[in-house]
Image (tube, rainbow, N blue to C red):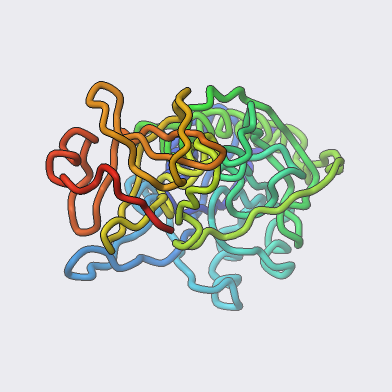
Amino acid sequence: MKTINIVYAGSPLASRFVLKNLISAQSECNFKIVGVLTNPPSTRGRHSDLIPTEVAQTARENNIPVFEFEHLLAEAREAISLLGADLLVSFDYGRIFGAKFLSLFPLGGINLHPSALPKYRGCTPVPAAILNGDASIGITVQKLALKMDEGDILAQENVPLTGSETTSSLMDGDGNTSLVTEIGAKMLKMVLKSAAESDSELTGKKQSGEASYTPFLKKEDGIIDWNCTAAQIERKIRAYTPFPLCSTTFDGLRLTILKAKPSDSKTSETPGTVLPYQKSVGIEIACGEGSVLVVTELQLEKKKAMDYKSFINGARNFVGSVLVS
C-alpha cells in the first residue's frame, strides 16, 4: 500500500481541528501531509499585529511547511509542485481552485463541506441550516470541481440537531473540537485510507436533487426585523453567531442580541416593543404575529455583554421602548 502525499488547505479554527485530527492519523491511514496552504496573516488588535491563521499555527507546531499565498497563480503553483503531492484536501480555505492548480495533484482534490450536497452549496451552509430550522445538518466529502461544490460525492452523513445549536457551536465547538469537524475528520480519514489503498483518483457518485446556494454574509444581514416571528428571530440569532451577530437599535445605539428564546406568551403590542419586565423570565420583546421573544443576554454599543438583569439595572428607560431596525 502506497503512502500518499497530501497538501491540506484551510484557514480558520474549525479547519485547524480537522488538520490536527489528520496529523494524528497519518501513519494509520497511509498518508503524509507534506504542506499546508492557508490564507496570509491578517491584522488584529490595537497595534494591527499580523497574526497567522489557526491552520498555519498548527502546521508550524508540527513542522509542516506553510504556504500563505494571496492568489493561486504561477508562483503558488510552482511552490506547491515542488512538494510532490498526490492529493489536495480542503476544508474552509476560502478560495476557488482553478484547473491549472488542481492539475498539480495526480489523484485530484477532495473537500469537506458541512451540508448534504447539493443542498446549501456555497460559503454559509451551517447558518442556512439553522435559519431554515432544519432537523439535521449534512456533512459531505466531495471531489473538488471547477464549479463551486458541484463535485461528485465520496461520503455523506446527516447528523440530528437539537434546535439549540449556533453556527459557532457546530463549527468551533469548545475550542478543541466540534460536531461538524469531529464527524467530518472521520469521514476524511475513511476517504484518504481508500485513496491510499487504490492509488488512483477517487470516484464518487453524481450529486442528485435540487441544488440550493448560500451567500456571503454581510454585517447588515444581522439587522433584526421585529415583524418576523419570535421563532424566526431566535433562529437568526443562533445562525449568525459568531458573525455577523444580530442587532437592533435602541436610543440611537446598536444593541446586539446574543441569546434569546421564543416564549409561549402572546401580545398585541407593536413589534419591537419591550414588554413589562419579568425578573424571573428575561426581557420580553414583542415580535410579528403576536409572538414574544425572551432575551437573556445582550450588548449595547461600546459596552460589554451583559445578562438581562445587569442590563435592565443600567437601562431604566428600556422597558416600554420600541426597538427599530
* Residue in the picture at 13% in, 39% down: 313
Quarter of the figure that contains the N terminus: top right
Depth check, front residue: 211 or 174: 211
Q: Pick out the residue farthest to the left.
A: 314
Instruction: Please provide percent x and percent y for residue 108.
Output: 73, 53
The spot of residue 232 in percent (x, y) is: 55, 39
Could you tell me if residue 71 is visible in this image? yes
Say whether residue 26 is visible. Answer: no
Quadrant holding the C terminus? bottom left
Which residue is rendered at x = 77% and y = 44% of the image? 118
**Where does the image place residue 152, in percent across and percent down from the top left?**
80, 45
288 horizontally vs 263: left or right: right
- Give the camera-side residue of 222 and 308: 308
Pick the front one: 37 or 33: 37
Specify the quadrant of the image occupied by residue 189. top right
Q: Residue furthest front?
A: 268
Query: How many badges with numbers are in the image?
Result: 0
User: Quadrant of the rendered structure where residue 193 is?
Assistant: top right
Q: Position of residue 164 (x, y in %)?
A: 47, 27
Foreground residue among 73 and 119: 119
Say which residue appears at 24% left-offset and 35% top-offset: 308
Extreme bottom residue here? 74
